[in-house]
Amino acid sequence: MLKVNDLFAWPETDAQERILRILWVSQHGDAYLNIDIHDPKAFPEPGKTAALQTAMDENIARKLDHDPYAHLLKAEDTLSEKERAYRDKGWNWIVKIVGLPAHGGYHRKSRGNAVQAACVLYGIKKSTIYRCLRRYWQRGLVKNALIPDWKEGMPHEGPDTVNGKPVHKKRGRPSKAEKRAGTRFGVPITERIKEYFTWGCGLYPTHPIKDIYERTLQNYFHKGFVEGVPILPPPSELPTLRQFRYWYQAYWDTDRERKAINRYGSKWVKLNLRAITGFSQAFGPGSVYQIDATIGNIYLVSSLRRTRLVGRPVVFLVVDVFSRLIVGIHITLENPSYLGAAMALFNAFEHKQELCRRYGIDCHPDEWPALGLPQVVYADGGELRGNQANNLANLLGVQVTNEPPYRADLKGIVERSFKSVTDLTIRWLPGAVDKERTRGDRDTRHDAVLNMHDFWKIMLRTVLFHNRTALANYRLETDMIEEGIDPIPSELWRWGIQNRSGQLRTKDTDVLRQSLLPVGQGSITPRGILFKKLHYTCPRAIQGHWFAKARMDGRKPLRISFDPRYPGRIYIPAEAPGRFDICEVTEIDRQFIQNNWEEVDDHFENRAERQEDLDGQRRQNLAALRVNNEAVIANAKAERREEQKMTGVKLTKTAAVASIHKNRQEELQAERNTNTWKPPIPGYPPAPGKIVSILPDRPTKTSTGHPEEDLSLIQRLLEEEG
């Protein structure tokens, strides 16, 4: 769909490609007005959208991605006083013309009347008004289009002059190739050619120099077209690549940083092209921590069902700047948030042995000695921003400094730790994401076999490995060198504690929980303390008969703090202010203690979805049951009516009720006769007229041929055997 200010290039028979700017598009998009941006006598011309689309489909016309006059979009404070005055004066002359209703400025009659009125009002010539109008139309329909092209202190030069003097041949000594050929390659770089170079660089600012050069020749130096292909003159009539490169570096690329910012953006330039003259430093352990989160380059499976992919985890790391020791870690399936950062900091402030023991890892305190609160925590402004993060400063006295976004270089230590962990471990695990994967390669997601519990184990062992492995580029201080300290994070930490102490601080564990652990709403039920569909208990609840009271009085709400890493335990406010009681999960839900909260929530969500399917099956089975029951009832009613009809007896309600006991006895006797268990007897019942051996040690008797007498005989024999 056409838009105002779109640019289209059309081939022409002359030496310059014709570039048209869209000035106006009809309401239905089937017609437009355009103007040639290089024609000094151009006026708006009508066109049909269908014809333009046909020309583009046949590669006759093409749409330009860059405006050659984009450089006019300057900030107001970058303009000189003379430039602003020149622009504003021209704008006052044409503002009423370009603002005519119904786009009247594009129509000859209404425009002519307005131009005549402006000439009378300001006492200027029509040519002056039309020159300003053309500049406004041709250069982007903005007020800054009227900024003059001249620069302060530069003489006005013609298009085919150099420093105001006409030239006819290329200057400088001939090259070896030119001497061999007996002719000169290239042409003098006149003001007109410089203008072509400027247009070419403006159209293709992100292209390589050679590509810009070739495209500039194609667009502005051709002699015409044959079947839409531009025909270039011989090399002797074209500027050389060396000339273009010299001009590009001398005039266009003078401010390389600004050009890089225009091409890639200021954030990318500051991250990747700035000078590297400093380094991160801190006085001692705990002076400065850096925290960051990244999405792990690996796919995991569910801890409840390994056949189900759960996606990629988010890994938080906290690193001490002084020693490079990884002091805290947290792994979650939640997106990066304050909760994940808080849990990583909680791990940095607490003993690590319990966390490692939870995953079956023996960890000596010397292997992971970090414990305590730092003075400053550097974050990237995402996770530790807002009211919740204020708890770090208000309750724990930790200063939080948020770095600007997209500046990972300002937290280079923790970023480097992520890379080390990835290169060392993650990239070699099954299910790891290969960033260099190309089309046709195997999808590594199908290789995923590790769950969150497994990944936690691997990452904890990797952290321990990092903390006791020498650093390659750590600059030891003079005191460290004199004492023979190796650049191992755990040794640097211990040396700093002995020689640079006073930076770390301690806080009560309950204060840490109150400050950092997330809070949720639970309830006291007859089965236990219910929180996120799991049940918990504690000695205080048992002694206070909370669960029995809940059965009598109903549920009661309860504020709960919980650790997202471990659903086997929650914390409730104790009777003493600022303290917590620990509640353990009950036996009925102990199957979830090896999972994390994300997996527990995922389990119950999947269970709820599965329950919907099971409810559908139940409704179908219930419908079949009811139909069958109704058929049995209908059959019973029919038999009852048939029986009453055959006997002709219809009991009264009183008589029917009075005979219940007698009827029950008869029905009971019939049930006994039907359901009595009779052990099978070999050879019984006998064939008539044959002898049956009941007991081997007794004389055989001949059957009388009457079943009743045979049964009497059998009963007597069984009674004799007692």
Image: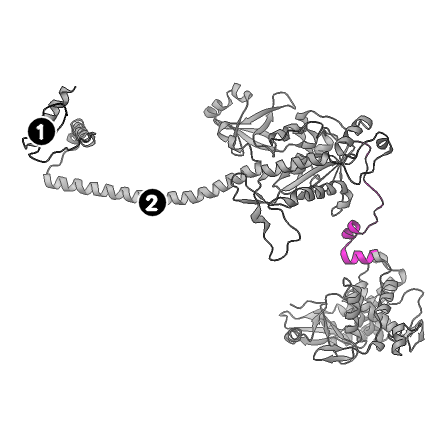
The residue carrying pointer 1 sits among few (fewer than 14), some (14 to 19) or many (20 or more) residues within 10 Å by Cα, namely some
- On the image, the x and y values in percent for residue 603 come to 51, 39
- On the image, the x and y values in percent for residue 572 come to 59, 26
Q: SS for tag 2?
A: helix
Front residue of 86 and 111: 86
Figure quadrant of the N terminus = bottom right
Tag on residue 623? Answer: 2
Tag on residue 710? Answer: 1
Q: Looking at the rendering, which quadrant does residue 357 occupy?
A: top right
Which residue appears at 67% of the width and 74% of the height? 59
Residue range of the region highlighted in magenta in the rendering? 257-286
98 displayed left or right of 176: left
Which residue appears at 89% of the width and 60% of the height? 81
Type of amino acid under label 2: Ala
Q: Mark 1 or 2 closer to N-term?
A: 2
Front residue of 120 and 568: 568
- On the image, the x and y values in percent for residue 213 come to 80, 69
